[in-house]
Amino acid sequence: MLVVEDSPLYSAEFFAAGDPYTYLNDLRENHPVSVHRRADGYEFYALTRYADVYAAYVDHVGLSSSYGTMIDGSYRPEKDSASGRMLIVADEPAHAQIKKPVKHSGFNREMIGRIGETVRRNIRTALGALSVGDRLDFTTVVAPELPKGVLEVLFGIGPQDALGLLEATRTMIGYRDQAYVGESPLDSLVDAQLNVLDFMDDLISARIRSGSSDDMIGFLAQLVAAGEMSRDVALLNGLNVAVGGNETTPHTASLCVATIDDERAQWRRVVDGQVASGVATQEFLRWTSTNSYVQRLSVRDVEIGGQTIPANSFVTLWNMAANRDPRVFDRPDEFIIDRPDNKQIAFGAGVHRCIGAPVATLEIQMFLEELAAWDKAFRVLAPPQRLHSNFMLGLTELQVEVIKAGEDG
Ligand code: HEM
């Protein structure tokens, strides 16, 4: 089995300025299960084939989430500090007990409908405020409108509070990127975490006082008041939903705009109604693979891809590599806007499959529909600035100019 010393997969710089897709394609085709070491002794197995990534996702018994789903999220033997209490780092049966009320209150049909209306309205307003000739950074002016609408509905807050929450979770996740935190990453991370937790705690108190359960945080607050959920669990999972929602779809939307600029002829088929927005959405999700990987820890020996991964090993599941596996996708390294039967795995699989997948899909689909219906278009002015992160594939800057629709080549 290939063992890579000082692997580039640890390097945020490699993901911002290098070519991680080519590197991962090579791993997938020649070393589908490989080991990646770092000088300080940290080591993980990397799975890059679709079938192996899928098999790992569904083996939630052999592969635990409680040790952190990001490289460096935690070190053995200590579990993640939120372990067992926060969805993303909880194993069964605690995980299922938390997922049920969060799903029931935040991701039911009625809530998803309300989120859709709010997000569409926000996007339409943001696009409507732009004039031909305007130059702007799409990542700061338009992209935040997607999660803003989700936060407004799930947390029952106004647009200004939603933007404040967005800024804080951005600092938490993108904290190694200077675009978000300047020179002092650790202080910024700690401050941002405290701000978000304080904000959520105040919301829970307010909902307990008012007795309202109209939104997700209100529903969780009433469980706290009834002694059916601890305040910690309500807080941590509010945080999990906020981070999950904020740090993904804005990046996906920015990458959509950059991709559209590269693929004008294909995009025109959506604008002209020849390709359904829902079909295009699936290809944008595959192509952008915003959450590049997740990590697990093997709690026993596990067989994957014909290899035995010993107990107590970190294992990383590379969504971005699985989403370009030629065994599953025809011409995987090409963007094909009407790709049929798209089995993209951007949201993971198994019990931890993204709780926000229907919401994220709706956000991106609505964004594409509003963009297609707009009487204007974006032209990218400069090479997009990629986020310094091996975990989230996104953009920190995308300078665009607003042009008349139809003049975009
Ligand atoms: C394009 C957008 C998104 C992508 C690519 C994405 C990706 C993922 C992936 C791969 C997982 C599985 C993690 C694992 O197995 O360890 C996940 C889990 C999760 N996501 Fe998303 N996500 C997106 C949007 C959202 C949104 C909009 C929300 C909330 C509004 C959200 C909230 C969550 C939460 C709470 C979890 C944990 C679920 C669990 O552990 O059961 N995500 N996401």
Image: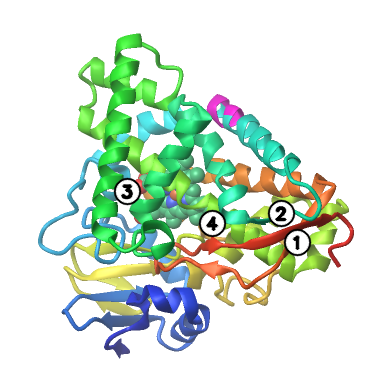
Q: Is residue 73 above or below residue 18?
A: above
SS at circle 3: helix
Most common secondary structure along the magenta stretch: helix
- N-terminal-most mark, 1 or 2: 2
Q: Amino acid at mark 2?
A: Val
Numbered circles on residues, count = 4
**Neighbour class for label 1 at 10 Å: few (<14), some, many (≥20)?**
many
Q: Which residue occupies 29% across, 82% down?
A: 35
Residue 351's disc is: none
Q: Distance between the Cα atoms at labels 3 and 4? A: 20 Å
Q: Looking at the figure, which quarter contains the C terminus?
A: bottom right
Q: Is mark 3 within 8 Å of ligand 1?
A: yes
Q: Is residue 88 visible?
A: yes
Residue 165 in picture, x, y percent from top left: 41, 39
Residue type, label 1: Asp
Q: Residues within 10 Å of mark 2 (few under 14, many from 20)?
A: some
Mark 2 vs mark 4: in front: 4
Q: Which sits earlier in the primary sequence, circle 3 or circle 4? A: 3
Locate the N terminus by quadrant: bottom left
Seen at 34% across and 52% down, the residue is 172
Give the amino acid type for the residue marked by disc 4 in the picture.
His
Q: CA distance from mark 1 to mark 3?
A: 32 Å
According to the picture, the residue beneath numbered tag 4 turns out to be: 251
Q: Is residue 300 magenta?
A: no
Q: Are marks 1 and 2 in contact (CB under 8 Å)?
A: yes
Please state which of residues 225 and 258 is positioned toward the viewer in this rendering: 258
Q: Dot 3 surroundings within 10 Å: few (below 14), some, or many (20 or more)?
A: many
The residue that mark 1 highlights is 338
Residue 315's image quarter?
Answer: bottom left
The tag earlier along the polypeptide, 3 or 2, is 3
